[in-house]
Amino acid sequence: MNRLAGKVALITGAGRGIGEAIARAFAREGAATVLAELDLEAARQVAERIERETPGARVLAVRTDVTQGASVCAARDAGEQAFGPIDTLVNNAGINVFCDPLTMTDDDWRRCFAVDLDGVWNGCKAVLPGMVERGRGSIVNIASTHAFQIIPGCFPYPVAKHGVLGLTRALGIEYAAKQVRVNAIAPGYVETQLTHDWWNGQPDPAAARQATLDLQPMKRIAQPHEIAMTAVFLASDDAPFINATCITVDGGRSALYHD
């Protein structure tokens, strides 16, 4: 506990799923937490939940559109006015865009990259100047196992996530001498509402769920808090020499040669 005491964190997409779990974990570990979320009401509900379960938590919900650099900068400014300089950024906001490459529209392509890659860069661009000036900081980008494994039918999502890894490595090296660390987490299957929605959209939801579990070496999928604790580790002083790398959290699935 209190591994993030005294730190200020900005988390995008904090209104549900992995982002909510990260926000709750950061607050439990002592960070003042800015919930930067497009759905402001969802962020406010998460903030209220954090305040109930972590008395004394400092939390702020701010409507943020990660596709707009000015919106991310406004969230940064609101967080710094409330709590002080941003020590940690978690770029979690993302959307699934799965298309057939040859029938995908230009709008589908732009929508995917606007959130899943441009949104990450907008977050980095907003906090890096302050981190570089202060000579400290940690950025954690939520990538995906799609960043290095391809599932047919998921284009162009893995293209954007490959870009997130490239961005992570490039920025991590660029600012290493300034003691600003940039890392990524690559989750595999995680039990979020989006996963349940996908299962429920199949002809046999129970069979679809079981098929997903059967693919996993551990015969289960991750819970959001298991991703969140990896983010806590990377943001904390327990990981001072981890930089420009990606931690895979998928129960070993990506190491499996074949089923």
Image: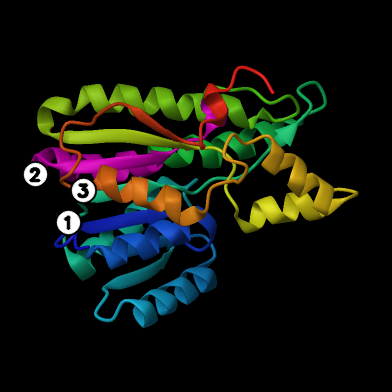
In the image, taking residue 17 as reference, residue 196 lies left or right, namely right
User: In the rendered structure, which disc, 1 or 3, sits on the residue that comes first in sequence?
Assistant: 1
Label 3, residues with CA under 10 Å away: few <14, some 14-19, many ≥20:
many
Asked if 58 appears above or below 135 in the picture, the reply is: below
- Percent of width and height locating residue 251: 51, 37
At x 59%, y 34%, the residue is 217
Q: Residue at x 43, y 48 (%)?
A: 227
On screen, residue 47 versus residue 87, left or right, reads right
Cβ atoms under marks 2 and 1 closer than 8 Å: yes
Q: Amino acid at mark 3?
A: Ser
Q: CA distance from mark 2 to mark 1?
A: 9 Å
* Label 1 vs label 3, nearer the camera: 3
**Whole-number angstrom distance, CA of label 1 to CA of label 3:** 16 Å
The magenta stretch is 122-147
Residue under numbered circle 3 = 236
Frontmost residue, 28 versus 43: 28
- Front in this rendered view, residue 182 or 39: 182
Residue at image position (51%, 31%) is 252
Choose mark 3 or mark 2, whichever is in front.
3
> Is residue 36 placed above or below 42 in the rendered structure?
above
The answer to the question of whether label 1 and label 3 lie on touching residues, with beta carbons closer than 8 A, is no
Query: Does the magenta segment cover residue 140?
Result: yes
Indicate which disc residue 134 carries: 2
Task: Return the residue found at the far right.
Answer: 203
Residue 162 seen by the camera: yes
Going from N to C along the chain, the mark reached first, 3 or 2, is 2
Element under disc 1: loop
Picture coordinates of residue 203, whole percent (x, y): 90, 49
Q: Which residue is mark 1?
A: 85
Q: How is the image coloured?
A: rainbow
